[in-house]
Image: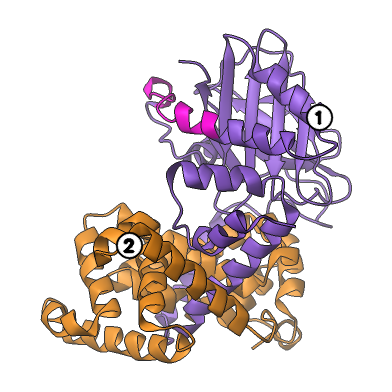
Chain colours: A purple, B orange
Amino acid sequence: MTDSRWSDLAGAYALDALEGEEKAAFEARLALDAELRKLVDEYREAAASIAAAVPERAPPAALRGRVLARAREARAPAAGKGSGEPRPRSSVVPWVLLAASLAGLSYVGLSNRSLRQDSASLIVEISALRDSLASTEGERERLQTLTRALTGSSVQVASLTGNVERRLWLVWNAEQNLLVVAASGLPPAEPNRTYQLWGIREGDQPVSLGTFNTGADGTAVVALSPGTQPSFEISALTVEPAGGSPQPTTTPFLAGPWRAAHD
Amino acid sequence: VRPTRDLTSLADEALMARVRDGDERALATLYDRHGRLVYSLARAIVPGDADAEEVTEDVFVALWTAPERFDASRGSLRGWIATMARTRSLDRVRSSKRRQMAHERAAVLSDEGTAVALAESESAEERVLLADVRTSLDRALSVLNDDQRRAVELAYFQGLSQSEIAAALGEPLGTVKTRLRDGMSKLRASLSAPQGAPR
């Protein structure tokens, strides 16, 4: 059963009213507490009901046509259940732009931007996640994997977010060729699909860092061995055909910048 | 693109399955069903028709390009769309120099006592809009007491954090936390019929 100190914060979290360490600790708890996630979902529905209270105003008639025209210009839906093989992308640039946008970065000057400014808060998140793992019986192995990855002088970390409440925490220990992926709120990929993680450097094609899937509760803590050095500015997540793709074939829906864990 | 009769009879989840398959008619049907909600909510947050229209475009294009982000096991499509509309509207306000104007609008929405003075800076049309929003919210959020409603509205329409709400209201942080907790708890309890069916 969820501790009341967390459930008491769920309503404020659903309104995006938590901040700082309190928010980080809540999200770390959320990653491991299915009951709390369900509560947050219910509070989000409650928050959305406020929208229904706003008196309706008809949008301009021309807006419908503009929406459909923009959709037509955009690429087809990404993770098509039953839509056949994803179509290959003709150019990686829009994909990278979207990933950078999701990561909260501008593509221009990406490599010059300091990606370390938020590393302290990210470490708080990961530490809280580690503490939560420690408090869960039967999660010792996960804890050991995370702890092993966090140990070392060349560790990089990333928190991947999008426009929804799914989240990935990444810890990359280059010395051990160990990339730990901790996921929350991420439903299992459709049959014959997998999640694929990408490393992105400005001007280069995305590099596959590995594939994984989540459990029925939407969480996962998996260790990947990317076989490459952690020299990427950002990482992004896509849905790909089972087994993974040489290059991304769908739209990235989570992305975030890499930062040094120990400045 | 005109939705056909068989599509308009489909529930949101079935339409989303078609969107995932690239059926543009399904997107058009969803727009016809939820476009007003998105535009109206955006218009209540952003200070201008043009911004509200852009938010509406963004929401439906996002729904089209990344439909896998919707997870029916976690809530209704209508709720998800409303969340996207709110988030994008707040992002737009935050990223613009019009934040101060939005602050004034929030004050109008949350405090009748200052409404008259602040509304003088708004156009006549804007004053009518805000008065409509105020009346409608009063009715819909009647399960909350005034303090809870004010805190919830500042968070929802202004995107303020707990500490920002405390500063704005001149109340202790703990008091604001309690109001948000109790207010959201009441709202959650007041939800009854499941949403997402054709309406």
Q: Residue at x 47, y 33 (%)?
A: A121
Above or below A258: residue A229: above
* Image coords of residue B31 (percent x, y): 57, 76
* Image coords of residue A210 (percent x, y): 76, 27
Q: Residue at x 45, y 83 (%)?
A: B144
Above or below A73: residue A156: above
Above or below B154: residue A218: above
Which residue has dot 1 on it?
A140
Is disc 2 surrounded by few (<14), some (14 to 19) or many (20+) residues within 10 Å?
many
Classify residue B131 by image quadrant.
Answer: bottom left
Left or right? Give the position of B43 relative to B48: right
The boundaries of the magenta stretch are A110-124
Which residue has dot 2 on it?
B165
Where is the C terminus of chain B found, in terms of image quarters? bottom right
**Foreground of the two, B152 or A201:** B152
Q: Amino acid at mark 1?
A: Arg
Left or right? Give the position of B97 relative to A245: left
Where residue B93 is drawn, which disc sits there? none
Q: Residue at x 20, y 66 (%)?
A: B101
